[in-house]
Amino acid sequence: MEPYNTFEHTADIGIEARGATLEEAFANAARGMFSIIVDNSDIAAVEQKEITLEATEDDEQLLVDWLSELLYIHDVEGLVFDRFDITIADGLHATAWGEPYSREKHGYGSEIKAVTYHMLAIKRNKKGTEIKVLFDI
């Protein structure tokens, strides 16, 4: 099974991400988000970024904070990422690897304006964790 897939929803676009653990599902959600931004082009792991987020009351809020922080870094620093090492315990700590966005290399994907709460879901089952999240484009 694929680690993530995208789906259309009215004027938005969403992803369904999966992982054996919550951390793996968060990483695959981020990979899916950046695949939308770079139109599925390859992202090289040439730069590293450390990201730390404070604990939240629930995993859904932490997911929104995580993806929103990555969007902020993309908007401000122009970076795109494809590899993540995440630990979730009393907040989130991650190392993200990627490179500066380049229109020549990454093409013209969709610009994501925000992570939304509409249809947001994190479900755990015997196979692991499944995430569903929509983005405002």
Image: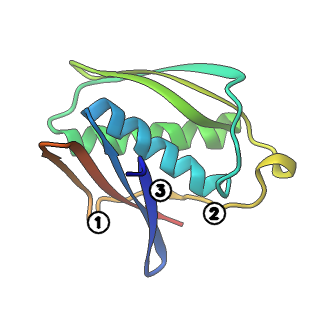
Q: Could you say whether the residue bearing mark 1 is in a helix, strand or loop? A: loop
* Residue sitting at x 36%, y 38%: 26
Per the image, the residue denoted by label 3 is 114
Question: Is there a contact, CB below 8 Å, between mark 2 and mark 1?
Answer: no
What's the image's color scheme? rainbow
In percent of width and height, residue 3 lies at 41, 46
With respect to residue 7, does 78 lie above or below? Answer: above
Q: Residue at x 29, y 51 (%)?
A: 131
User: Disc 2 marks which amino acid?
Assistant: Ser
User: Alpha-carbon neighbours of circle 1 within 10 Å: few (<14), some, or many (≥20)?
Assistant: few
> Residue 62 is drawn in which quadrant?
top left
Q: Pick the quarter of the image with the C terminus.
A: bottom right
Lower position in the chain sequence, tag 2 or tag 1: 2
Q: Tell me: 68 left or right of 18.
A: right
Mark 2 — residue?
Answer: 110
Q: Amino acid at mark 1?
A: His
Measured in 3D between alpha carbons, the distance from the residue under mark 2 to the one under mark 1, in whole angstroms, is 19 Å
**Which amino acid, mark 3?**
Ala
Give the spatial CA distance, label 3 vs label 1. Answer: 11 Å
Classify residue 28 as left or right of residue 20: right
Residue at the (37%, 51%) spot, across then down:
1
- At horizontal 82% and vertical 47% (from top left) the residue drawn is 105
Instruction: For mark 3, give the secondary structure.
Output: strand
Q: Secondary structure at mark 2?
A: loop
Badge 2 crowding class, 10 Å Cα cut-off, few under 14, some 14 to 19, many 20 or more, is some
Position of residue 29 in the picture relative to residue 58 (left or right): right
**Residue for badge 1:** 118
Q: Is residue 122 left or right of residue 25?
A: left
Pick out the residue farthest to the bottom: 10
